[in-house]
Image (cartoon, rainbow, N blue to C red):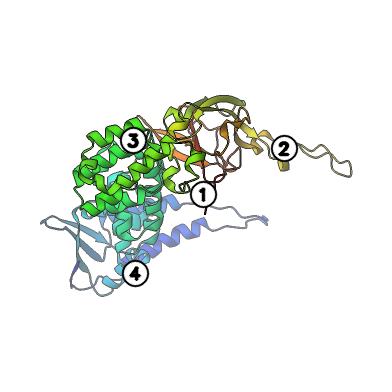
Amino acid sequence: MLRLGYTKPGSWASFWAILTLVGLVTRAAQKTDVGGESTGTSINHSQTLLQRLQELLRQGNASDVVLRVQAAGTDEVRVFHAHRLLLGLHSELFRELLSNQSEVVLQEPRDGAAVFDKFIRYLYCGELVVLLAQAIPLHRLAAKYGVSSLQRGVADYMRAHLAGGAGPAVGWYHYAVSTGDEALRQSCLQFLAWNLSAVAGSAEWGAVSPELLAQLLPRSDLVLQDELELFHALEAWLGRARPPPAVAERALRSIRYPMIPPAQLFQLQARSAALARHGAAVADLLLQAYQFHAASPLHYAKFFDVNGSSFLPRNYLAPAWGAPWVINNPARDDRSTSFQTQLGPSGHDSGRRVTWNVLFSPRWLPVSLRPVYADAAGTALPLARPEDGRPRLVVTPASSGGDAAGVSFQKTVLVGTRQHGRLLVRHAYSFHQSSEEAGDFLAHADLQRRNSEYLVENALHLHLIVKPVYHPLIRTPK
């Protein structure tokens, strides 16, 4: 809400003062051609202009408008002596408001009023320092007054801090939904999916809305210890949120019960308050899970459809589905390791293992970049440089025996980052189901830099995950 007041408009003196400043710097920065030089020399005093504009704002010299910013619900008013030319250059709304007004009263939320000085400073200097708690009020001010460059800059800041694990992802998600910022919404959703274990154990989990929960639960790229952890997180959310029965039952039906071992399913049925209240809504899914664990997957698939998401593991961190791998100084040499995973999630396969061999190469050269010593005419060609290569990760089974009959494997590699003492997922790479490597693995990473966003204390923190998938090789009878 804007409350306008009218006083006599200011003079044009401020307009000419500002134009004089801009003109001085423009002339100083022009290229010159002295003494017949073929190229000019750039003289850049833009920092001087910025300093003078800061002084202009701070001291209010030659100001021709007054902004009175009142925090909503309070008597607190902050006064800014400004210049309609500079405000109007950035904002069509300011240009309209100040076209025949010398003083305006702006009603802003308390958090917006608290950062209005930073907002105005950006209009004068094109820069500001953002703190996490200031991101939403600054973004809201930029959107309200139509300062698109600041709006984009704050949104980029939010997405970057989400990737590093510093941003309040749940709060920013709900804000993105309210403003229609789809790119920010997707960034928040991706961070929450990749770091669900960390979020579910934090105070943010209680602020998750039913709409956000409904977005998260169907996803197969959720990263957590196992499906049981997701069930307990959902049960805690249900206990706090107390949603309507239909919402609770829909959420409980999103749990992939076949991914939970039978012994743990029995405990849930005996002890879970959520199942005691809504057990009838998931009785068919629990029966399906017990049947799945009782038979071999090949036999089960003769009678039931295994193509649904219930039979696809998510990105589980438990030892049965993968292993962590910390590579120190990853820019130096090729490395290798091996680990084992369970053949499949069925109880029938719980004692059967598949061994995987992994090769990491920091500077593998694609065929197109491999050294060529001479062309067809015999002319020597320059060798490809090692830095022209890119990191490569290859995951292969140790043997091609019959243990994996009826099962194909989908592989995922998580890249971790440390933030506030905890390890979070910053990047995730999925392999094509028939491939032994991810084609885009660390394609844009600079592992040479010690402060690389991909490294933690000069080490590359990976977690390798292998998901058994039944449906590509099994067809249910029609």
Q: Which residue is mark 1?
A: 476
* Mark 3 element type: helix
Mark-to-mark CA distance, 3 and 1: 28 Å
Query: Where 88 falls versus 371 (above or below)?
Result: below
| Nearer the camera: disc 1 or disc 4 | 1
Callout 3–callout 2 Cβ contact below 8 Å: no
Q: Which residue is mark 4?
A: 92
Callout 4–callout 3 Cβ contact below 8 Å: no
Query: Where 227 falls versus 76 (above or below)?
Result: above
Pinpoint residue 87: horizontal percent, then vertical percent. Answer: 32, 64
Amino acid at the residue labelled 2? Ala
**Quadrant that contains the N terminus:** bottom left
Of labels 2 and 1, earlier in sequence is: 2
Of residue 146 and residue 442, the one placed in the foreground of this image is 442
Name the residue furthest right: 377
Mark-to-mark CA distance, 2 and 1: 51 Å
Number of numbered labels in the structure image? 4
Of labels 3 and 1, earlier in sequence is: 3
In the rendering, which numbered label is found on residue 228?
Answer: 3
Mark-to-mark CA distance, 2 and 4: 53 Å
Of labels 3 and 2, earlier in sequence is: 3
Q: Is residue 365 visible?
A: yes
Amino acid at the residue labelled 4? Glu
Q: Residues within 10 Å of mark 1 (few under 14, many from 20)?
A: some
Amino acid at the residue labelled 1? Thr
Q: Which residue is mark 2?
A: 384
Residue 385 located left or right of residue 417:
right
Residue positioned 24% across, 60% down in the render: 81
Mark-to-mark CA distance, 1 and 4: 62 Å
| Nearer the camera: disc 4 or disc 3 | 3
Of labels 1 and 4, earlier in sequence is: 4
